[in-house]
């Protein structure tokens, strides 16, 4: 698989020149470039999307596409072989434990309207798991999310990485998304670079709340696109859009 580019959204503390970032980037991009399809080949080749036909053989508005869960799993397996941890839990308890929250200022409180009373019930602190996590020398920690959902899922992944950086749980956060040439041939409405890029200006501002950390987006793409029916579509998952897409592959 190709690595098209890695865009640094923010860099607090000059980590872009650190050996820890260089090692992290080299490791996960090497894993990406080692990904292949079909199994046993030397490149990542995928079938072009094709229009699904009705019972009379006429084209419909639905498409046969490649699944994304199996692609992500291949990436995770390669990082697992390199001793990365999978599904690391993340929560924002470190925010609640901070001295700023123990001695809250008005700007740190949430109030109800119109009563203007401070919300007293505890807020939920779990934000799910990070796809893969690794501890580097010098106590550096890296987290990577591989996109398998729609654009809303991409936003959640970026927000999750921002929270991990803001709370000091990691110093390196990376989201991997398909390119504009890749995503049309994947599960319908998969999150992608084109739709995500307008919001980078927002996430860049988050860097102002991070003492030390780097947030980046890596864009990936197939090595080759083919119409060859001997190349199977990548199997699809069993949830959400994947389930819909799976029903379209005949």
Image (cartoon, grey):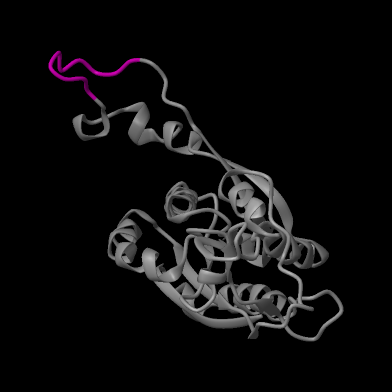
Residue 88 horizontal side relative to residue 196, left or right: right
x, y percentage for residue 208?
30, 58
Q: Residue furthest right?
A: 40
Q: Quadrant of residue 37?
A: bottom right
Q: Quadrant of the C terminus?
A: bottom right
Residue 9 horizontal side relative to residue 4, left or right: left
Q: Quadrant of residue 238?
A: top right
Q: Quadrant of the N terminus?
A: bottom right
Tell whether position 19 is magenta: no
What residue do we see at 57% from left, 70% from top? 185
Q: Residue furthest left?
A: 114
x, y percentage for residue 127?
51, 39
Residue 170 horizontal side relative to residue 231, left or right: left
Tell whether position 114 is magenta: yes
**Quick check: 101 above or below 19?**
above
Residues shaded magenta: 111-120
Q: How many marks?
A: 0
């Amino acid at each position: 698989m190709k690595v098209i580019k890695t865009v640094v959204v923010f860099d607090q503390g000059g980590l872009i020149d650190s050996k820890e970032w260089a090692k992290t980037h080299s490791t996960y991009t090497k894993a990406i470039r080692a990904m292949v399809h079909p199994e046993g080949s030397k490149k990542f080749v995928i079938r072009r999307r094709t229009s699904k036909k009705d019972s009379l053989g006429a084209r419909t508005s639905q498409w046969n596409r490649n699944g994304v869960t199996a692609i992500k799993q291949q990436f995770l397996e390669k990082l697992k072989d390199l001793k990365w941890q999978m599904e690391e839990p993340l929560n924002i308890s470190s925010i609640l434990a901070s001295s700023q929250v123990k001695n809250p200022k008005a700007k740190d409180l949430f109030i109800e309207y119109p009563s203007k009373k401070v919300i007293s019930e505890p807020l939920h602190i779990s934000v799910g798991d990070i796809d893969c996590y690794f501890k580097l020398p010098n106590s550096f920690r890296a987290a990577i999310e591989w996109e398998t959902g729609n654009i809303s899922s991409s936003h959640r992944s970026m927000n999750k990485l921002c929270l991990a950086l803001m709370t000091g749980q990691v110093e390196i956060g990376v989201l991997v998304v398909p390119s504009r040439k890749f995503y049309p041939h994947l599960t319908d409405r998969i999150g992608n670079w084109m739709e995500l890029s307008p919001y980078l200006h927002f996430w860049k501002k988050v860097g102002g709340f991070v003492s030390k950390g780097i947030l980046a987006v890596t864009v990936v793409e197939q090595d080759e696109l083919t119409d060859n029916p001997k190349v199977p579509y990548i199997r699809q998952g069993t949830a959400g859009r994947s389930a819909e897409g799976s029903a379209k592959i005949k």
